[in-house]
Image (spheres, grey):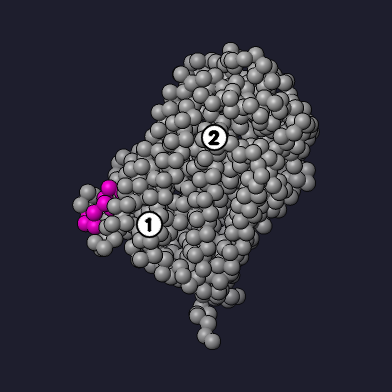
Amino acid sequence: MQNVDAIGSGIPAIPKDNYLTNGFTLKSWLLTKDHKRIAIMYLISISLFFMAGGLYASAIRLELLTPETDLLTSATYNKVFTQHGILMIFFFLIPSIPAVLGNFLLPIMIGAKDLALPRINLLSLYIYWLGGALTVYALLQGGVDTGWTFYTPYSTTFSNSYVMAVGLGIFINGFSSILTGLNFIVTIHTMRAPGMTWFRLPLFVWAQYATSLVMILGTPVIAITVLLLAIERAVGVGIFDPAIGGDPILFQHLFWFYSHPAVYIMVLPGMGVISELISNFSRKKIFGYEFIAFSSIAIAVFGFLVWGHHMFVSGQSIYAGMVFSFLTMVVAVPSAIKMFNWSATLYKGSISYDTPMLYAIGFMGLFLIGGLTGLFLGSMGLVVHLTDTYFVVSHFHYVMVGGQVIAYLGGLHYWWPKITGRMYSEFWGKISAMLVFIGFNLTFFPQFILGYMGMPRRYASYPAEFQVLNIFSTAGASVLAVGFVMPLIYLMHSLFYGKPAGDNPWMLPGLEWRTTSPPPTENFEKTPVVTWEAYEFGEESGLDLEAARTRDSVTTV
Amino acid sequence: MSDKHMETGEGHIGYPGYFGVFAILVFGTIFTYFSSFWDLDGTLFPGANTLLALAIAFFKMTCVMLFFMHVYWSPRMIWLSAVASLFWLAIMFAYTMSDYFTRSLGVFSV
Ligand SMILES: [Cu+2]
């Protein structure tokens, strides 16, 4: 066992031959077929988009510091929140965990040399860049003011902003996630190492599989919908505009047929990361493996049957609304199964509070709030009061940031030693995890109250009585921003000054910890044969249990 | 894919077959164009024109999937995926139409 050797030989060292040292030219990166290098390029790209989206968020929070429309004009404000949404959703959240952590780890976790279709993987990165570049260009030209939802007839008939260009950017970008999803499905079906049966797959892989299903079934619909919108805008074919024979509600049907499942594209991979973190940092076999695996698939399937809950007050038939409302309650069940299983895994586990685990515990609380407030919004009566208020804004930020972003950060910290071969500062990691948690709650919890009191979203001004809670929210956003910037600093610092992590810094049984850190280009020196179950912490896993027991004295600075 | 067609390089039905399928697709397109001039909505039932156009589109899509995408010669797993994707499309149509068909019923009263 390499990991045992690494521990046995005292101080671990960075292996000379790894995927990072396999060529230093620009060409060796841009034309690589190595899933790990593609993941690194994705990591850099989505981080840039996250920062751009974050700047827009700062502008929103600063404007809302005062009740008057003062920092931005109303027209600019419309563009700012639209662009915040578009950049964060299409260019950060959707690719975040699949394209970065999934790309890097999925082949390693199943014992494969690469994804099944490495060239397609590189192609998906280039498509992402192309879509991103086009969108950024359109934003710099003047941007778009329709909201990220592009609702008709405003987007087709009235808006004179760059709807077409941004729409084209999103259309192109969609193919990137279709290709990634396709690649993952083929890889999981065909590239598993000997002994890696379906029920020995890490739950992260199951989550990626479910996500990929949603990606390839849903994304074509948004692509075609945006295309229809462009056709109506450009040639005047009556699809959505009632004046020329269309139906604006049809747009909402098509849009949400993708965009509700897209919520699961954004959160399922996060759930996969959390399953890994909870089990591994409790050193306990995950409770109800099959239930968690199949609940991911159930979410992917049922997630397609609930989209009408975004349209309760849009003029949709009340009978269709009843069906959608009922199914919305149903889709909460598989998420609840996961929550219960994670809690049961913690019970009597040997829990260590490393930085990734802090994020995982944060996720459990925040996702619980985000998920349960979704049920408020899925009930037809209450939603009449809550539609288009800050309650909605707060709800989906609890799921998207409190869920996915937190899980992404947790996963990034957890696998950072594997990706780079070096440990970050545990002290600063913990501080930033706590700052993110505190800042996040301070930002978004007041928005639940504001929304419930009736403050509508998407306005630059508001009645003076809402100011106190808005000041809380803006203050929280500042704390949150510090929490997000800190990892950037100490993770970069660790690249040069971090302690070499060794193959298996957390002393875990997963396949990714049985190769060097960073892994070689072909991932494993020889194809591994899997003889143990997932999350096996006993003798069967081949781990040095004594070393695992004393892990803290090995890794803690 | 361990099928024989990888070796021959010209596919299961050869170029004549592929051009035949292509001809059917072009014919379907032309037929769709001309059928839109018939007043089926007036003579049969409202929406009949759309239904016919969709039926032709589905037929063309099936041809593409079976022959151009080689589903016809593929293992059952691929058949299953193809049928599942059609099922997905059916979900989208059915639930969307559930809105349109019941919208005129208004709000129920006790
Ligand atoms: Cu939804």
Evaluate if marks 2 and 1 touch, with contact meaning CB atoms under 8 Å apart: no
Residue in the picture at 70% in, 41% down: A285
Q: Secondary structure at mark 2?
A: loop
* Position of residue B82 in the picture relative to residue A125 (left or right): right
The residue carrying pointer 1 sits among few (fewer than 14), some (14 to 19) or many (20 or more) residues within 10 Å by Cα, namely many
Q: Quadrant of the N terminus of chain A?
A: top right
Q: Nearer the viewer, residue A265 or A287?
A: A287
Membership of A62 in magenta stretch: yes
Pinpoint the chain carrying mark 1.
Answer: A
Q: Which x, y percent locates residue B31?
A: 60, 58
Q: Is residue A65 above or below residue A377?
A: above
Q: CA distance from mark 2 to mark 1?
A: 30 Å
* Position of residue A538 in the picture relative to residue A501 (left or right): right
Q: Which x, y percent locates residue A430?
A: 47, 35
Pinpoint the chain carrying mark 2.
Answer: A
The kind of residue tagged 1 is Gln
Q: Both on one chain, marks 2 and 1?
A: yes
Q: Which x, y percent locates residue A299?
A: 62, 54
Q: Secondary structure at mark 1?
A: helix
Residue in the picture at 42% in, 66% down: A386
Q: Main secondary structure of the magenta part?
A: loop
Which residue is labeled 2 in the image?
A354
Q: Which mark is residue A447?
A: 1
Q: Which residues, given as a range, are shown in magenta?
A: A60-69
> CB at mark 1 closer than 8 A to ligand 1?
no
Q: Which x, y percent locates residue B34?
A: 56, 61
Membership of A485 in magenta stretch: no
The kind of residue tagged 2 is Asp
Instruction: Kindly indicate the quadrant of the structure image that contains residue A247.
Output: bottom left
